Amino acid sequence: MKIIVLDGYALNPGDLSWEALKALGTVTVYDRTPPDLVQERAVGAQILLTNKSVISGDAIRHLPDLRYIGVMATGYNVVDISAAGEKSIVVSNVPAYSSASVAQLTFALILELAQAVGAHANDVRNGGWPASKDFSYWVQPLHELSGKTLGIIGLGQIGQAVARIALAFGMRVIASHKHPERDKMEGVQFTDQATCFREADIVSLHCPLNDDNREFVNAALLATMKSTAWLINTSRGPLIREVDLAAALNDGRIGGAGLDVLSAEPPAADNPLLSARNCIITPHIAWASVEARSRLMDGVVANVKAFQEGRPRNVVGK
């Protein structure tokens, strides 16, 4: 089978191997594919793999040989699922490969806001400690997590992993979730979204993006948060109306934010969050540990092999 990988660099910049995939067919790997070349590069492929390259309905309708689309990620909004279904094209994703890594980065952001390790290390490197009159100093207030309330929006596998870490820190954990009965978790109190934002010292987003929640974190919702509260987003950038969050940070209406995702990636240079007060931004790296990417590669290969054997797995959009 002809297998085309549209954007392989993010998954494998050179520290992993494509050999297991190459054992399943004739493989062509493109590091990156601009939107105007997706259809051209996909011509003749029975199997098309993508991470963030968008596979539109128009492209799907012009690829008569295509039988399978593998999303090299968990989120599959880059594929026109309806168009794929019309042509009986199977679409699979790789769920849960990065739960531990995303939870880890979530707390890396929280801990940087709480303890400012990076800011203090930079100040020491820049001569702050040798010039200090005291044996100890701090460049901003430091905070304990124990006793603080963490509000989790979406208690799926990642949200649960975050909750376990929070509980280990001695935090109170509340959560807003669509399926509280199915996903009950000891130590976590379920509540509604409004209560999470109103009561939490830290709100962390772990929900998928859909038409109903796009930019749901807006000026009105941010206004209900404590002025000292922090907002964390390692989920999807468009969940937040960025101009509203920047204004809330700059005006001191909330205490800080830690973001691994933005509405456009890479962002425009004039994105207001890039210069917002007390806003820590990382370049969408929560998923990208070596261990998580290794699991992702294994999942991609297993999905392709299962499809070839007539037992497709992790099928989405049925």
Image (cartoon, rainbow, N blue to C red):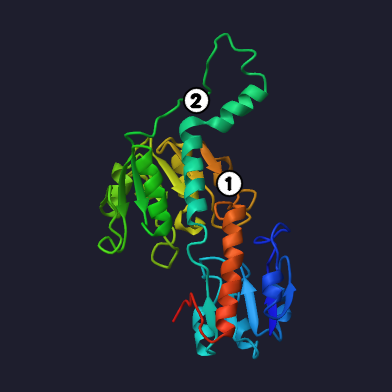
Residue that lies at the very extreme toward the top in this rendered image: 133
| Numbered tag placed on residue 178 in the rendering | none
Q: Residues within 10 Å of mark 1 (few under 14, many from 20)?
A: some
The numbered disc on residue 282 is: 1
Percent of width and height locating residue 55: 60, 76
Dot 2 or dot 1, earlier in sequence: 2
Disc 1 residue type? Thr
Frontmost residue, 88 versus 259: 88
Q: Quadrant of the N terminus?
A: bottom right
Residue in the picture at 38% in, 66% down: 212
Q: Which mark is residue 140?
A: 2
How far across and down, in percent of the image, does residue 185 sit? 29, 54
Taking depth in this image into account, of 187 and 245 the one nearest to the observer is 187
Label 2 CA crowd tier, 10 Å (few <14, some 14–19, many 20+): few
- Find residue 227 and report its horizontal and vertical position in percent: 37, 36
The quadrant holding residue 127 is top right
Q: Is residue 63 above or below residue 142?
A: below
